[in-house]
């Protein structure tokens, strides 16, 4: 049986990363300019935090969050409703054979960063992070 060549690598290829960044920039600019004719999207300021593309470039997962972090589900529904128009905009901007299918998800990285910051600022963690007062750094004691 042949190996699945897409799962042998440690991460995304340079092509995947390049296409994902182009998609992120293009979608961000289109939403900022108001190229999508949807009143719900016109009222929201949406941040496209990250785009992940499958190895065959057929699906792009877009991680988006409205400014302020509220109504994330409404923003995702509005983006999904306008997927066809967004794909048309991407098709004009990208120089690839097939425009990937778009899937939208709420970007939770800011929440994860806040949680990490809260954990690191706890007193017990701060106490563990402080250097210990040893007389000698190599662990040996002076006699």
Image (cartoon, helix red, strand yellow):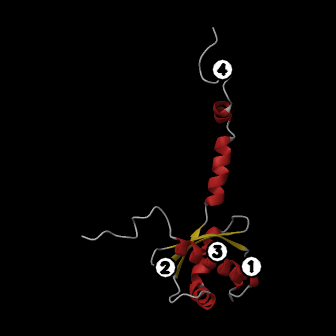
Residue drawn at (66%, 42%) of the image: 120
Q: Disc 4 to disc 1, how far (Cα)? A: 62 Å
**Which residue is at the front of the view, 23 or 38?**
23
- Callout 2: helix, strand or loop? loop
The image shows residue 117 at horizontal and vertical percentages of 68, 47
Q: Earlier in the sequence, mark 2 or mark 1?
A: 1
Q: Are marks 4 and 1 in contact (CB under 8 Å)?
A: no
Q: Which residue is mark 1?
A: 43
Label 4 vs label 3, nearer the camera: 4
**Which residue is at the front of the view, 99 or 1?**
1
Q: Earlier in the sequence, mark 2 or mark 4?
A: 2
Q: Earlier in the sequence, mark 3 or mark 1?
A: 1
**Residue extending farthest top:** 143
Q: Which residue is mark 3?
A: 75
Q: Which residue is mark 2?
A: 57
The image shows residue 36 at horizontal and vertical percentages of 68, 87
Q: Disc 2 to disc 1, how far (Cα)? A: 31 Å
Residue drawn at (68%, 29%) of the image: 131
Residue drawn at (46%, 74%) of the image: 55
**Which residue is at the front of the view, 16 or 84?**
16
Q: Disc 3 to disc 1, how far (Cα)? A: 10 Å
């Amino acid at each position: 049986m042949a190996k699945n060549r897409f799962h042998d690598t440690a991460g995304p290829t340079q092509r995947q990363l390049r296409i994902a960044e182009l998609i992120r920039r293009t979608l961000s600019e289109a939403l900022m300019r108001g190229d999508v004719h949807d009143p719900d999207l016109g009222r929201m300021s949406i941040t496209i935090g990250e785009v992940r593309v499958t190895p065959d470039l057929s699906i792009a997962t877009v991680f988006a969050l409205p400014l302020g972090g509220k109504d994330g589900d409404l923003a995702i529904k509005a983006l999904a409703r306008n997927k066809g128009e967004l794909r048309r905009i991407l098709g004009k901007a990208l120089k690839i054979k097939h425009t990937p299918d778009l899937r939208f998800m709420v970007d939770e990285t800011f929440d994860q960063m806040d949680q990490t910051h809260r954990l690191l600022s706890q007193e017990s963690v701060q106490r563990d992070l402080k250097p210990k007062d040893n007389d000698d750094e190599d662990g040996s004691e002076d006699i």
